Structures are given as C-alpha cells and as structure tokens.
C-alpha cells in the first residue's frame, strides 16, 4: 500500500504537495486592473487566441499579461493561475448579475431562512 491513503481516506493534496493555490489569492492586490480582468477570463478555460478576441487585445499582449500574473501571484504555470482565478472568482468579479454571485446569494438566503 502506498502513502496516499490512510485509514481516514486520501491525504490532503495541498498538504501532500506543499502547494496551496489559494495562497496566490493573497497576492491579487498586486495585479493591475487589466491583469485582474485577464485572470478572471483565464479562469473560464479559454485559450490565448480566444482571450485576445474577448478582450480586444493582441494575443502576444495576453501572453504578456499572463506571464506577469504568474510572476506576481507566485504561481508556476498558466494552469495554476487559471485554478487561482476559479478559486478567487468572487474577489475578481464585480458583476452583480454574475451567475456565481446570484447562486451564492440564493444559497445564503436559504441557509438563513432554515436557521
């Protein structure tokens, strides 16, 4: 048997690898407004070409923004930055009509009425 499982179930992947992507969320304040926008869009899973089209900028500009985001948030890869974007969506997104914000509000309303 390997060390991946204990009697209680799988070992926490954050603890096992020593990497917690949420730590990058503490560094979001170092990003410019445009970098925050690129990071938010990166969390959707779009490629550089699609990001460039959505944001109305050149693909090489998208690459430069992503490189800066990865460096400033101390991530190692674009994929880690995308995971960070998904984890920090609520902090990055200010759209009150966002489906995630609406769902979260409804969820909180149900919890408070059940109490």
Image (cartoon, rainbow, N blue to C red):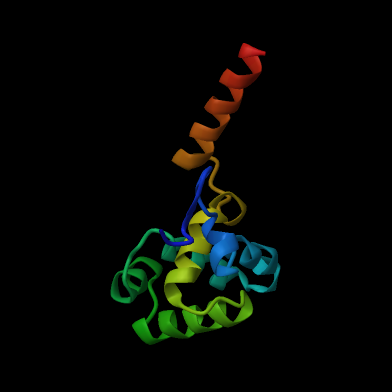
* Percent x, y of residue 37: 52, 65
Q: What residue occupies the far top of the structure in this picture?
A: 114
Vertical position of residue 64 compared to residue 73: above or below: below
Vertical position of residue 99 compared to residue 92: above or below: above
Count up the numbered dots. Answer: 0
Vertical position of residue 45 compared to residue 113: above or below: below
Q: What residue occupies the far front of the structure in this picture?
A: 1
Vertical position of residue 64 compared to residue 51: above or below: below
Nearest the viewer among 94 and 114 is 114
Q: Residue at x 58, y 82 (%)?
A: 71
Nearest the viewer among 44 and 87 is 87
* Percent x, y of residue 113: 63, 13
Q: Residue at x 38, y 58 (%)?
A: 44
Q: Residue at x 54, y 68 (%)?
A: 17
Question: Which quadrant does the C terminus fall into?
Answer: top right
* Percent x, y of residue 87: 54, 55
* Percent x, y of residue 75: 55, 76
């Amino acid at each position: 048997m390997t060390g991946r499982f204990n009697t209680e179930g799988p070992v926490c992947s954050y603890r096992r690898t020593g990497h917690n992507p949420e730590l990058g969320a503490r560094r979001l304040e170092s990003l410019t407004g445009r970098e925050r926008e690129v990071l938010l869009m990166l969390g959707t899973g779009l490629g550089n070409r699609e990001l460039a089209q959505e944001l109305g900028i050149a693909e090489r500009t998208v690459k430069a923004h992503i490189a800066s985001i990865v460096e400033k948030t101390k991530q190692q890869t674009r994929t880690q930055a995308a995971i960070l974007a998904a984890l920090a969506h609520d902090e990055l997104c200010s759209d009150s009509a966002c489906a995630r914000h609406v769902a979260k509000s409804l969820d909180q309303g149900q919890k408070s009425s059940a109490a």
